[in-house]
Each structure stands twice: as C-alpha cells, then as structure tokens.
C-alpha cells in the first residue's frame, strides 16, 4: 500500500501565531546558521512570559507569574 504524501505548506498557507510574534520567520542558510526575523532576546522574553518551564514548576518558591529577571 502506498503512503500518502503530506501536504507541503505554501506561502499562502501561514500558520496561526500569537499576535506578539506576527511576522516571525526562521530559516537555516547553507552554512547551518539560523536566520530569524526577530531578535533572539525578544523571542526569549516572549517565551519567559508565556511558557511555563516544566523543570522549575515543581520547585519550592517557584511562581508562574514571577518575573525571572
């Protein structure tokens, strides 16, 4: 039985993203370097604010709303 091919995303079909990350795009060039449309510091700030660190959530004194900086 032949496997069906997965649908390749075209330029017209963009994924839904958080409004703060609108226009975010990541590409890898021929040298293996990651090229991003947003600064890494902005991405880290967004992740710190919106994603709970699974390794830290069970520790004493950890608060989800706490600013890590």
Image: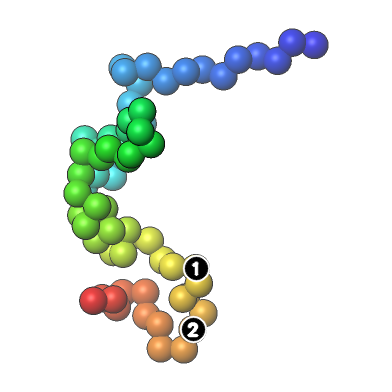
Question: Element at badge 2?
Answer: loop
Vertically, is 44 above or below 25? Answer: below
- What residue sits 31% from the left and 64% below the top? 48
The residue lying toward the viewer, choosing from 65 and 26, is 26
Say which quarter of the image contains residue 6. top right
Question: Element at badge 1?
Answer: loop
Residue 51 visible in the shown view: yes
Label 2 sits on residue: 59
Report x, y in % for residue 5: 60, 15
- Confirm or deny contact between disc 2 and disc 1 (CB under 8 A): no
Disc assigned to residue 27: none
- What residue sits 38% from the left and 61% below the top? 51
Q: Is 33 situated left or right of 56 in this image?
A: left
Give the CA separation, mark 2 to mark 1: 10 Å
Disc assigned to residue 54: 1
| Residue at the limit of the structure toward the front, as seen here | 31
Vertically, is 51 above or below 36? Answer: below
Report x, y in % for residue 33: 33, 39
| Residue at the limit of the structure toward the right, as seen here | 1
- What residue sits 44% from the left and 68% below the top? 53
Dividing the image into 4 quarters, which one contains the C terminus?
Answer: bottom left
Of the numbered discs 2 and 1, the one sitting upstream in the chain is 1
Residue 16 visible in the shown view: no
Report x, y in % for residue 31: 35, 33
Q: Is 1 situated left or right of 66 in this image?
A: right
Q: Residues within 10 Å of mark 1 (few under 14, many from 20)?
A: few
- What residue sits 46% from the left and 89% below the top? 60
The residue lying toward the viewer, choosing from 24 and 58, is 24
| Residue at the limit of the structure toward the top, as seen here | 2
Vertically, is 25 above or below 9? Answer: below
């Amino acid at each position: 039985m032949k496997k069906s091919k997965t649908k390749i995303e075209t330029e017209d079909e963009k994924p839904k993203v958080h409004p703060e990350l609108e226009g975010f795009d990541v590409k890898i060039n021929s040298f293996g370097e990651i090229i991003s449309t947003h600064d890494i510091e902005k991405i880290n700030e967004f992740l710190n604010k919106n994603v709970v660190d699974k390794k830290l959530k069970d520790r004493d004194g950890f608060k989800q709303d706490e600013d890590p900086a």
